[in-house]
Image (cartoon, rainbow, N blue to C red):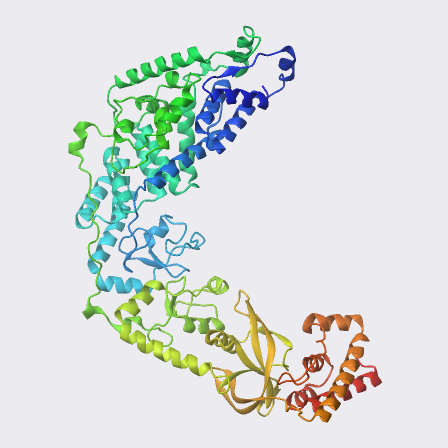
Amino acid sequence: MSLNRLDEEYALEKRGRFFVASDTQGNREGEANVDHHELILLKADALASENRLKEAVDMYTMALRYDPVRPDQLSALVGCVLRNFKKKTEESPIKTERQHESEFDCPGCLSFICEPVTLTCGHSYCRRCLQQNALSKCKLCNEDIRTRPGEPRLNVIVSGLLEKWFPEDARRTKSIGEAESLLKSKRYEEAITLTSKLIESDASNVWVWECQAEAHRELKHFPQALQDWESCLRIIPSPERYFRKAKILQEMGCVDESLQVFLQCLALDENFHQAKREVELILHDLLSPACENVKVGLRETTQNTATHLRSKTLFAEDQEQQTQIQVQSATHAASSQPPLKTLEKPGRSESLQQSGLSTAHSLHVPGISRTIEEGLKRVDSSSQLSDPDKGAPLKRKLSEEGEGVTYSHGSKYKKHDETDSIATPVVKEETSPRVVPPELLDPNDFECSLCMRLFYHPVTTPCGHTFCRTCLERCLDHNFQCPLCKESLQEYLACRKYTVTQVLDNIIQRHLSGEHSERLKLHTEETKELSDLTKNVPVFVCTMAYPTVPCPLHVFEPRYRLMIRRCMETGTRQFGMCISDTEKGFVDYGCMLQIRSMHFLPDGRSVVDTIGGKRFRVLSRGIKDGYSIANIEYLEDTKVNDVEELGKLQVLHDQVYEKARKWFQKLENRFRNQILQHFGPMPEREGDIQATPNGPAYCWWLLAVLPVDPRCQLSILSMTTVKERLIKIRHILTYLQIHHRV
């Protein structure tokens, strides 16, 4: 059967009839080698990808009747069902998640954050959330947190403060840990006793409910376990919790309800592969024939029909009448089934039968897709979906997901005698935020152990210790170890994410506002002092630098790391460059450098791309934190106002420019290429040679590339007239041409 014929038949089938074209001898011979089963699956996948659910279900049903189909081959159908499900849940939102409001609550589980762990993004979570792998991304900034190496370490400062301020909450958190230990040691009854006491005092902790749910599940108390998972979902919905609730429903044989919850899990996380696999298995069971010997190949059906019909033959009318009778009989048979035994754990096929599914009646007919389509309208109908006495086939219930979804977390499986015995738990919401006792608030608890001052921009290392950001950076300039515990911070240094610890910074600003204002004022004064570009200007003692000429630097000494960092933090992005002097430390003249970009290496070194700016003369020298500083005054060329003198200066300028151009062109290729690579091409001739305070740019480019002693270059740098500079450069070029030196 060709794809063209399948398209033709489905065009007819959409009008309510299924036609089978009459075969000819030629057609049968041409189709001898066609894989009909594969063609049907391809067509079904195409229909599912186009959200044509009714037709897709028909095709998958035919494929299953024709030959076996693996559950994973129904992934396109799962996607189609999920898209319909999500579309309707968006129209009727399930539940608005409780927002993270207090700095003392974990953003992940919204419970008290007694064991805080600070991530590289600066946000803190309880250690239990990270140990349980409950999160893949930070809920506050969406940063990926799965790459965090090793065991989560407690934030030492924050953990100590919370235990001091909220001892009752701290004890309750430790009790939850004890309950989890009881659960691991299989002492389930004791775990339930302890969690029940914890719930009485605070029912808003999701981990207590999870621990109790797992204990009930291990004891086969499925109704109680289901109640606990519903309580978890009321506090904070998550794909993992929906999945666990669905598994409990499966254990109880409520396959129809479990399918809904699996879809709810996938609606939150489409990449939850375990849930997708379960949905594939349920759909596979749903669409499969009642038994293996009922398979009817489409090719055989076509051939049998072709012997009676020479043209297209309509045969769906009788079948549709048969379908209606069979579905009615299936519904009547299901309604007479005994009530569901919730504490039994049947197999998958038995569960389907207990849920009112009769695959022999509902799927062994060509017109079943209409049942699927109509059925996608009732996924939220508690009475219709959950009451096994109604007996509607699961396939119809699956298909009823298309309209009016209003999902409820409440249990819908219970029998009437169970409703009274198991009360629905009420999750208590926090009515008032935690308040720090004023008598326990001590500014000394917020003191950096390096600078002995109040934390300013506190950052927390992977080992759990907290320092001011600037203090930590200065320490890491010298070694890669934590200043307190000496643990290696090489990986932390390589990523260079010194993000402020938000919970600690918020506490300081909110509860120590006066001290924080004083600390901020002090920092502002220090920054203003460092921003002055005439007094205490940082000086890099290294090499000659010239205006407009690039000067790349490799910064590796701790003192210069600090100096460059301060230039970036203050926003000036400038520092002076001078060559060394044996007597004074550095010479009297230099050039300011403007930082254009920086590239950090994993070990803390950096490659800094700079370009020359203003020239300066040193007035006085000093030392600050290991690097040189100076008070300076800037140099500018004296302008020529006389017209005759300016004309002579222009002639001199043109002569020197032409002489320099010829010298550069006569260089060997290897030298010329090196110059081009490091300094770029020679600047173009300028129309106004007095337009800038430093004169023509090509003079400084020549001075940088000419093989001249640095002292000679320094003398030219200090000149304040263009004429003097041009005459000196002409002498150097003449000397090089005479002696043929490169």
Q: Report the side of 498 relative to 582 (left or right).
A: left
Residue closest to the far front: 643
Name the foreground residue: 338 vs 643. Answer: 643
Name the foreground residue: 739 vs 657. Answer: 657
Q: Is residue 438 above or below residue 307?
A: below
Query: Can I make out residue 611 in this image?
Result: yes
Q: Is residue 356 above or below residue 635?
A: above
Q: Is residue 94 above or below residue 363?
A: below
Quadrant showing the N terminus: top right
Quadrant showing the C terminus: bottom right
Q: Report the side of 627 relative to 353 (left or right).
A: right
Residue shown at the point (16%, 33%) measured from the top left: 421
Name the foreground residue: 76 vs 724. Answer: 724
Task: Answer with the quarter of the image where residue 684 lies.
Answer: bottom right
Q: Is residue 697 above or below residue 425?
A: below
Residue closest to the far top: 308
Name the foreground residue: 224 vs 4. Answer: 4
Task: Answer with the quarter of the image where residue 475 lies.
Answer: bottom left
Which x, y percent locates residue 433? 22, 58
Which x, y percent locates residue 257? 31, 31
Task: Answer with the quarter of the image where residue 704 lies.
Answer: bottom right
Residue closest to the far left: 420
Residue shown at the point (40%, 22%) measured from the top left: 370
Q: Report the side of 144 relative to 311 (left or right).
A: left
